[in-house]
Image (cartoon, grey):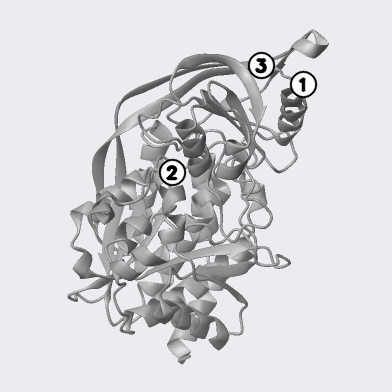
């Protein structure tokens, strides 16, 4: 490492900017896509990029269905005990306004096998938010809800697998008709017991969907080149909490990295995209990917989950070159790095990856994790607050991101063969179809 780079990294260690940005984001109320807090966050971040000398900073608006929650209620009828009980529940974004009353069925983790073992037609199912313990991949809530809808369920209850009286959230697909709500681990335990006794539940949700607007905050720095490294992070958050971990930390890491990179000599242009509406179905990154020529993107680095936990985690999405680069950078500074090579479609790299753009998602995991850390913990609940973040982790991950981007601008990376990607995801095709994320153009292959 040359002396100038070392000096810039040293300055980054003392920078207060990333933590200040994280603090500002978490002080804003309601950064859900299309809501006023998301627009205020975009304004803050545009100002930050301009202060850092990023060129061509702009806010690029796009239309969205803007969902606003009203009231949610959950009532359990326990006939065997001649008892009714109300429980706290939260509608999942894009849940339609609805009232559903039906038998309650416990379907475990919500896998196809568990759903097929029960009669779920015209029933409300309750499923854990956890991934089955022996699974070799993450089970997303969208595939569980999709499987339940395919089998005729009339409602879905997502029970948090982590104790703490924390109902989880997470969006549905726009236009879904299956009402879905989140409940706490503790409520889930009661509901599973009641389901075994033949209970029924009534779910009532008030909500609205109106035409709305979100925006991506974009800019660039470095030399003008034929292709560019795209560095992105989503700045929206669910309306139930501050969104510190998901994804305030990722935004803070991006700002910290840009603060250093903007003063470095780079071999390629770096484009910045702080995208909206990730939590509502990747709408910001889908809009961005549709507006650029994929051939002009050398690689995409997605900061979603980075800065939360002590150990940096690199999701390399099947690219040997990306894995080799990230590993080499971590080894050069003797920093631990966890690597996950399996591609997945559940974050903002996906609209670019499926067009053949090499993708790296920087995430993180606790230092004592055994490598199967797929679970959300605090995120997507009201406990996703700034006190869970750590300034040292944010700074270190910003420095590591800087080194990765710097090397990536000077390294040739092969494009992803989309036929190979499709083949690699073939085992996940049923789950991706259930979740509504299998690419339409792959059906013709």
- Residue at the top extreme of this rendering: 82
Query: Which residue bears the numbered disc 2?
Result: 435
Q: Are marks 2 and 3 in contact (CB under 8 Å)?
A: no
Query: Which residue bears the numbered disc 1?
Result: 197
**Horizontal side of residue 48 vs 242, given as left or right:** left
* Dot 2: element: helix
- Residue at the bottom extreme of this rendering: 2
Q: Distance from label 2 to label 3 (Cα)?
A: 26 Å
Label annotation for residue 96: none
Label annotation for residue 200: 3
The mark nearer the N terminus, 2 or 3, is 3
Q: Is residue 334 in view from this perspective?
A: yes
Tag nearer the camera, 1 or 2: 1
Give neighbour class at mark 2: few <14, some 14-19, many 20+ (Cα, 10 Å): many
Q: Nearer the viewer, residue 437 or 48?
A: 437
Q: Distance from label 1 to label 2 (Cα)?
A: 31 Å
* Dot 3: element: strand
Residue 160 screen position, x and y as percent: 66, 39
**Horizontal side of residue 418 vs 161, given as left or right:** left
Residue positioned 46% across, 56% down in the render: 428
The mark nearer the N terminus, 1 or 2, is 1
Q: Nearer the viewer, residue 433 or 242?
A: 433
Figure disc tally: 3
């Amino acid at each position: 490492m040359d002396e100038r780079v070392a000096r810039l990294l040293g300055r980054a260690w003392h920078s207060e900017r990333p933590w200040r940005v994280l603090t500002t984001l978490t002080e804003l109320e309601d950064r859900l896509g299309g809501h006023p807090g998301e627009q205020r966050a975009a304004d803050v971040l545009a100002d930050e990029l301009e202060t850092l000398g990023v060129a061509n900073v702009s806010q690029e608006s796009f239309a969205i269905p803007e969902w606003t929650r009203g009231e949610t209620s959950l009532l359990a009828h326990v006939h065997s005990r001649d008892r009714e009980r109300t429980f706290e529940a939260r509608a999942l974004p894009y849940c339609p306004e609805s009232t559903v009353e039906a038998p309650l069925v416990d379907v475990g983790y919500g896998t196809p096998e568990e759903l097929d073992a029960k009669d779920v037609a015209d029933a409300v199912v309750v499923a854990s938010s956890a991934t089955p313990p022996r699974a070799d991949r993450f089970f997303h809530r969208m595939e569980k809800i999709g499987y339940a809808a395919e089998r005729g369920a009339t409602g879905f209850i997502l029970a948090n697998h982590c104790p703490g009286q924390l109902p989880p959230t997470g969006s549905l697909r726009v236009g879904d008709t299956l009402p879905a709500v989140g409940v706490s681990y503790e409520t889930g335990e009661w509901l599973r017991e009641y389901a075994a006794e033949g209970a029924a539940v009534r779910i009532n949700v008030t909500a609205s969907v109106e035409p709305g607007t979100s925006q991506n905050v974009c800019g660039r720095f470095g030399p003008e080149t034929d292709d560019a490294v795209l560095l992105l992070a989503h700045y929206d958050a669910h309306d139930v909490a501050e969104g510190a971990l998901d994804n305030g930390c990722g935004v803070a890491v991006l700002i910290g990295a840009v603060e250093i990179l903007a003063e470095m000599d780079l071999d390629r242009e770096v484009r910045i995209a702080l995208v909206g509406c990730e939590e509502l179905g990747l709408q910001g990154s889908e809009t961005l990917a549709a507006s650029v020529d994929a051939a002009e993107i050398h690689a995409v680095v997605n900061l979603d989950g980075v800065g939360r936990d002590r150990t940096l985690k690199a999701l390399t999405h099947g690219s040997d070159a990306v894995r080799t680069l990230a590993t080499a950078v971590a080894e050069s500074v003797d920093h631990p790095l966890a690597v996950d090579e399996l591609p997945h479609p559940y974050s903002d790299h996906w609209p670019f990856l499926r067009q053949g753009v090499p993708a790296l998602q920087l995430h993180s995991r606790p230092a004592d994790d055994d490598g199967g850390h797929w679970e959300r913990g605090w995120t997507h609940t009201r406990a996703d607050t700034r006190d869970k973040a750590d300034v040292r982790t944010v700074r270190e991950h910003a420095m590591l991101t800087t080194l990765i981007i710097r090397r990536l601008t000077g390294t040739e990376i092969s494009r992803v063969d989309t036929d190979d990607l499709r083949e690699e995801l073939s085992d996940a095709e049923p789950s991706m179809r259930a979740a509504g994320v299998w690419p339409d153009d792959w059906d013709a292959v």
